[in-house]
Amino acid sequence: MPRKRGIFMTYTEKVLADLKAKNPDQPEFIQAATEVLEALAPVVNTDPKYQKAGPVSYTHLTLPTNSL
């Protein structure tokens, strides 16, 4: 597991580090991901079932084309 300042990184810290490495030119995305991961950290870092699921990747979003 990667190390952070002499201690092991939590699962959410590792996910965030991976996101930063893969998206260095997306500061708004990194900020949003940081806020979400910090909010989820107390649950995700203590319950292995969430860690087993792994991060979710959304590569395509389709919006409805129906007019109102």
Image (cartoon, rainbow, N blue to C red):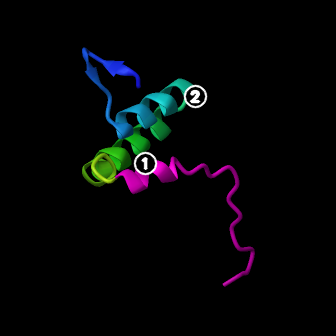
State the image quarter where residue 64 is shown.
bottom right
Name the residue at 25% across, 15% down: 6
Of helix, strand and loop, which mostly describes the magenta segment?
A: loop
> In the rendered view, would you say 64 is above or below 14?
below
Label whose residue precedes the other's in the sequence (1 or 2)? 2
Cα distance in 3D space between marks 1 and 2:
20 Å
Q: Residue at x 68, y 67 (%)?
A: 63
Vertical position of residue 36 compared to residue 9: above or below: below
Q: Which mark is residue 17?
A: none
Q: Amino acid at mark 2?
A: Lys
> Which amino acid, mark 1?
Gln
Q: Quadrant of residue 49?
A: bottom left
**Helix, strand or loop at mark 1:** helix
Viewed as shown, does residue 21 lie left or right of 59?
A: left
Q: Say how many tags the image has.
A: 2
Foreground residue among 17 and 61: 17
> From this viewpoint, which residue is outermost toward the right?
65
Q: Give the left or right position of residue 61, taking residue 35 as reference.
A: right
Q: Is 53 situated left or right of 59 in this image?
A: left
Please report the bounds of the magenta region as a residue range. Answer: 48-68
Q: Position of residue 27 (x, y in %)?
A: 47, 32
Does 31 lie within the magenta span?
Answer: no
Which residue is under mark 1?
A: 51
Q: Residues within 10 Å of mark 1 (few under 14, many from 20)?
A: few
Outermost residue, bottom side:
68
Residue 6's place in the image compared with 18, above or below, is: above
Where does residue 41 sit, x and y in percent of width and height? 29, 47
Q: Position of residue 35 (x, y in %)?
A: 34, 45
Q: Which residue is mark 2?
A: 22
Residues 5 and 34: in front is 5
